[in-house]
Amino acid sequence: MYRDEEEIRGGAVPAPATTAAGPASETGPTTAEPALGPLLVGLQLTDSAFPSGFYTLSHSLEGFAQAGAVDRQSLPALLADLLRHGVGPADATALALAHRATLAGDAAAVVRIDEHLFATKLGREMRQAATRTGRQLLDLAAEVFDRPEITAHFGRVVRGESPGTQAVAAGVIHAAAGVPVRQAVAADLFAFCASFAGAALRLRLTDHRGAQVLLRGAAPVIEETAEAALRRELADVGATVFASDIMSGRHERADARLFAS
């Protein structure tokens, strides 16, 4: 029956149902979308403009380039290997564990995770890169996000009570800022890939278009690596990328270096 006919007959015409998110769908209630706050935090922390120090790192890529062991065609495979066997089992896993420990209010566990991750980094160059970027990240995040958990961990690092690795710092910051652990791990893995792609660009191993293709191609590996990291325990933390360790060691003694790692 048409609406006009219903009104002529004196029948009540119900108003469309509404929800906090807007008018309800005719096929069912509208599900409220998650708040944008955590997403915006993740975007800010992974933005290349965020001065965390990642811009100074090549993640051993410069060592590979100096040895002639990588080219444009082999870049995707190298990045995938570093994700699956390096940053995933080590940094991403430590980030997830630190995130959970922060939410639980277990500062002692955060320190244990930080010490464990630091101990697994075999080369001096990688250890220095991890702690320098971690300390810088905490210093800025304490001001930007103004959360007591971040300030407390930064204080422990300054006092020498915790090494201050970047991954653990990121876990604390994401947790304190309300970013879910899965999203936090994925965001940090993407930041690693963006830093790697930027280094490849500066080393002339690719161009701007190729860098974007590289990043998009890494997306399935990021998803795979993130899910694996979320399932690991502290005893599992550690990388098995020995070629990267060797290249990093050679890079540390190179006559000329564009990157700190």
Image (tube, helix red, strand yellow):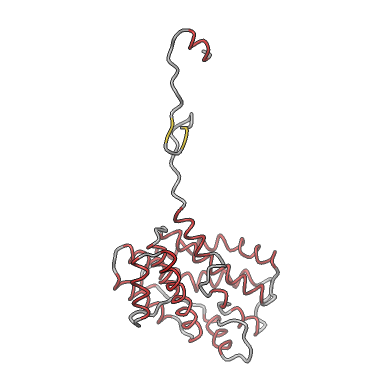
What x and y, as percent, mark residue 93?
42, 69
Q: Going by the image, does 66 lie left or right of 86?
A: right
Q: Is residue 2 above or below residue 68?
A: above
- For the C terminus, the image quarter is bottom right
Residue at the spot 30% in from the left edge and 63% down from the top edge: 104
Residue at the spot 45% in from the left edge and 45% down from the top edge: 33
Q: Is residue 107 above or below residue 119?
A: above
User: On the image, which quarter does residue 194 sit in?
Assistant: bottom right
Q: Is residue 56 above or below residue 97?
A: below
Residue at the spot 46% in from the left edge and 26% down from the top edge: 16
Q: Going by the image, does 204 lie left or right of 15?
A: right
Residue at the spot 57% in from the left edge and 84% down from the top edge: 247
What x and y, as percent, mark residue 246?
55, 85
Q: Is residue 235 above or below residue 225?
A: below
Is 93 in front, or is 21?
A: 21
The number of numbered discs placed on residues in the rendered structure image is: 0
